[in-house]
Amino acid sequence: MSDVSLMVVEDDRLVLATVTQGLRQAGYEVRAADSGEQALELLEQADVDLVILDIRMPGLSGVELAERLKQRDIPFIALTAYSEEDLVLALGELGALCYLVKPVDMSQLIPAIETALYRARELVRLRRSEYHLSNALQGDRRVSQAVGLLM
């Protein structure tokens, strides 16, 4: 797990410290941010494999940060105290790979992280396949057009 880099974004410093420490003990490399703004600053400095994101934060909210993560193709899971249906749906549309409701312990969080990491790698493979297939189809179109012109 030491080659996996995580970021925990949580405005409650006690929860941030507890989750960060537990993940480090489990063997993950962990960056901690106590706000959405700090998370964006840290993401400029280093890449992460997965972001664990609190949703209701002052300043840049977790939903707003999720939108930015989606734009940058950075996978994330939501870790929040709120389970309203509209929030769950909104985060699902933004690409959340998992939605966990606090309180959560390491025995719940680690399997969710590992599953999310697997899904994120799978999505990257699918995007690459789509790109290659699209290029192949475009090449076939060019060949067909050239044949049509020659005929």
Image (tube, rainbow, N blue to C red):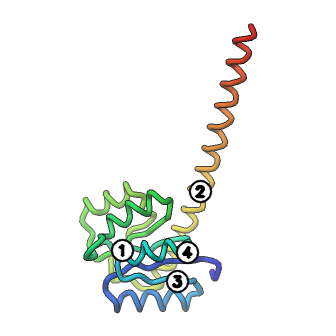
Label 2 to label 1, Cα distance in Å?
A: 25 Å
Residue that carries the numbered disc 1 in the rendered image: 36
- At a point 36% along the width and 74% down the height, the residue shown is 37
Label 1 to label 3, Cα distance in Å?
A: 16 Å
Contact flag, marks 2 and 1 (Cβ < 8 Å): no
Which of the two discs, 4 and 3, labels the residue nearer the N terminus? 3
Q: Of helix, strand and loop, which one carries label 4? A: loop
Residue that carries the numbered disc 2 in the rendered image: 124
Label 4 to label 1, Cα distance in Å?
A: 15 Å
In the picture, the quarter occupied by the C terminus is top right
Q: Of helix, strand and loop, which one carries label 2? A: helix
Residue that carries the numbered disc 3 in the rendered image: 30
Q: Mark 1 belongs to which amino acid?
A: Gly
In the picture, the quarter occupied by the N terminus is bottom right
Q: Mark 2 belongs to which amino acid?
A: Val
Q: Of helix, strand and loop, which one carries label 3? A: strand
Residue 120: percent from the left, percent from the top? 55, 62
- Compared to 93, does 40 lie above or below? below
Q: Of helix, strand and loop, which one carries label 1? A: helix
Badge 3 density bin: few <14, some 14–19, many ≥20, Cα 10 Å: many
Which of the two discs, 1 and 3, labels the residue nearer the N terminus? 3
Which of the two discs, 2 and 1, labels the residue nearer the N terminus? 1
Label 4 to label 3, Cα distance in Å?
A: 11 Å
Residue that carries the numbered disc 4 in the rendered image: 46
- At a point 39% along the width and 73% down the height, the residue shown is 53
- Say left or right for 114 vs 150: left
Badge 1 density bin: few <14, some 14–19, many ≥20, Cα 10 Å: many
Residue 79: percent from the left, percent from the top? 37, 75
